[in-house]
């Protein structure tokens, strides 16, 4: 069974631009969560989608948004990029079976110049 | 939400058994205890999950006392490749309640 796939793996953008990251969950997983990881703040929860609906959201500004498609694939978008948005963005999927074990992708490394 | 406290870092040597303890004094009745491992520039990887007593898999063991206010991840006979950050998480089935702490940076020496 294929794992969680995130594309692209690396991305370089400049301030003010916007970016879209993609995540394909493990087949059969309907829950997709996004995290931001930085050296200073660690792993922070962005939001979670389940059946195309945002189920929960972390404490991030509205510039961070996401969506989920009917095949459970998910995208997250960051608009008006700031230098502080440079981070490793991780996507995780789970079966939502109750024990909530999350399976993570390798992440997208975003650098904002 | 149950907050967790782990040592910031630990050192050990190849072949030793390593035990990483996590405190979660405010754990709720429905909460599970889950451990993840993360290597640099990779996503966390699920290691083990438990609710009470002892759980063992091919990678590690998880010991949970009766009061469930702490847990200990045990890695038998570690190798250099076990050098990583280990996160202890406590939460129920809702994904929104997954909060990663600072983790424990484990360094294994030859």
Image (cartoon, coloured by chain):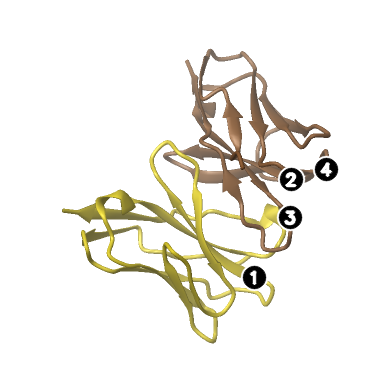
Chain colours: A brown, B yellow
In the rendering, at what x and y percent does residue B96 appear?
69, 53
Disc 4 is placed on an element classified as loop
Q: Residues within 10 Å of mark 1 (few under 14, many from 20)?
A: many
Q: CA distance from mark 1 to mark 3?
A: 15 Å
Crowdedness near tag 2: few (<14), some (14–19) or many (≥20) residues, C-alpha within 10 Å: few
* Quadrant in which residue A78 is drawn: top right
> The numbered mark 4 sits on a residue in which chain?
A
Along the polypeptide, which appears first: circle 2 or circle 4? 2
Ranked by sequence position, the earlier of labels 3 and 4 is 4
Question: Label 3 is found on which chain of the structure?
Answer: A
Residue at 56% across, 43% down = A104
Q: Are marks 3 and 2 in contact (CB under 8 Å)?
A: no
Give the structural element (helix, strand or loop) at label 3. loop
Would you name the residue on which mark 2 appears? A28
To which residue does mark 4 refer? A51
Q: Give the residue number, with chain letter if any, for mark 3.
A: A96
Q: CA distance from mark 4 to mark 1?
A: 24 Å
Q: Residue placed at 63% from the left, 64% from the top? A: B91
Q: Which residue is mark 1?
A: B31
| Residues at marks 2 and 4 touching, judged by CB atoms closer than 8 Å | no
């Amino acid at each position: 069974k294929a794992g969680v796939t995130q594309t692209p793996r690396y991305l370089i953008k400049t301030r003010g631009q916007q970016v879209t990251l993609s995540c394909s969950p493990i087949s059969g997983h309907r829950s997709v969560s996004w995290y931001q990881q930085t050296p200073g703040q660690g792993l922070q929860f962005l939001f979670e989608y389940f059946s195309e609906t945002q189920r929960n959201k972390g404490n991030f500004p509205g510039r961070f948004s996401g969506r989920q498609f009917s095949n459970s694939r998910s995208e997250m978008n960051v608009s008006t990029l700031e230098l502080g948005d440079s981070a490793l963005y991780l996507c995780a999927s789970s079966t939502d079976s109750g024990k909530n074990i999350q399976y993570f992708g390798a992440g997208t490394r975003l650098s904002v110049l | 939400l149950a907050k967790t406290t782990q040592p910031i870092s630990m050192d050990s040597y190849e072949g030793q058994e390593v035990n990483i303890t996590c405190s979660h004094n405010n754990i709720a009745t429905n909460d599970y205890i889950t451990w993840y491992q993360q290597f640099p520039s990779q996503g966390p990887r699920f290691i083990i999950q438990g609710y009470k007593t002892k759980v063992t898999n091919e990678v590690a063991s998880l010991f949970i006392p009766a009061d469930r206010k702490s847990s200990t991840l045990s890695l038998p006979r570690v190798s250099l490749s076990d050098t990583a950050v280990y996160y202890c998480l406590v939460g129920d089935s809702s994904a929104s309640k997954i909060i990663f702490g600072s983790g424990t940076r484990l360094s294994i020496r030859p």
